[in-house]
């Protein structure tokens, strides 16, 4: 595999969304797009890599997750993956019937 390119077929563990070193608005759009794509694909776990810095992107990530009922922050990543200070592990759950009604209108 060429350096710098990722193949989801050969990867193990959750999909990573890199928003590190991005401006807030750009990071928000990318996070939203990638979470929605992962949801539609049926992924159940993603890792958002936001870096440490001043904590702006970490807070934005946490706020985004709280705004969506089908997302949950995993405090303990289990056997495969644990959260580190520069990333947040997110579980994507199936939508509730109310969420489905909103999205299917």
Image (tube, helix red, strand yellow):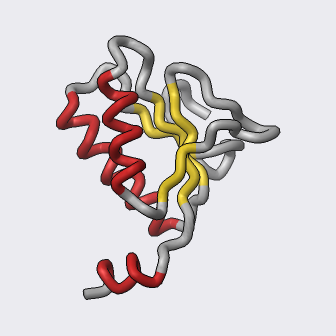
Q: Is residue 83 left or right of residue 100?
A: right
Q: Is residue 104 left or right of residue 77?
A: left
Q: Quadrant of residue 89?
A: top right
| Image quarter of the C terminus | bottom left
Q: Position of residue 96 (x, y in %)?
A: 48, 77
Front residue of 15 and 52: 52
Q: Quadrant of residue 50?
A: top left
Q: Residue at x 33, y 13 (%)?
A: 54
Q: Position of residue 25 (x, y in %)?
A: 18, 36
Q: Is residue 38 left or right of residue 23?
A: right
Q: Position of residue 72 (x, y in %)?
A: 53, 51
Extreme-left residue of the structure: 25
| Image quarter of the N terminus | top right
Extreme-right residue of the structure: 79
How many numbered discs?
A: 0
Q: Residue at x 21, y 26 (%)?
A: 23
Rendered position, 36 above or below 104: above
Front residue of 10 and 45: 45
Q: Residue at x 48, y 56 (%)?
A: 71
Extreme-top residue of the structure: 53
Q: Position of residue 7 (x, y in %)?
A: 58, 44
């Amino acid at each position: 595999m060429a350096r710098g390119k990722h193949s989801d077929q050969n990867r193990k563990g959750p999909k990573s969304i890199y928003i590190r070193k991005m401006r807030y608005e750009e990071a928000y759009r990318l996070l939203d797009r990638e979470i929605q794509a992962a949801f539609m694909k049926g992924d159940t776990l993603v890792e958002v890599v936001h870096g440490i810095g001043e904590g702006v992107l970490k807070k934005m990530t946490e706020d985004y997750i709280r705004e969506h009922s089908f997302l949950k922050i995993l405090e303990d990543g289990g056997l495969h993956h644990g959260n580190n200070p520069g990333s947040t592990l997110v579980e994507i759950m199936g939508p509730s019937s109310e969420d489905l009604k909103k999205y299917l209108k």
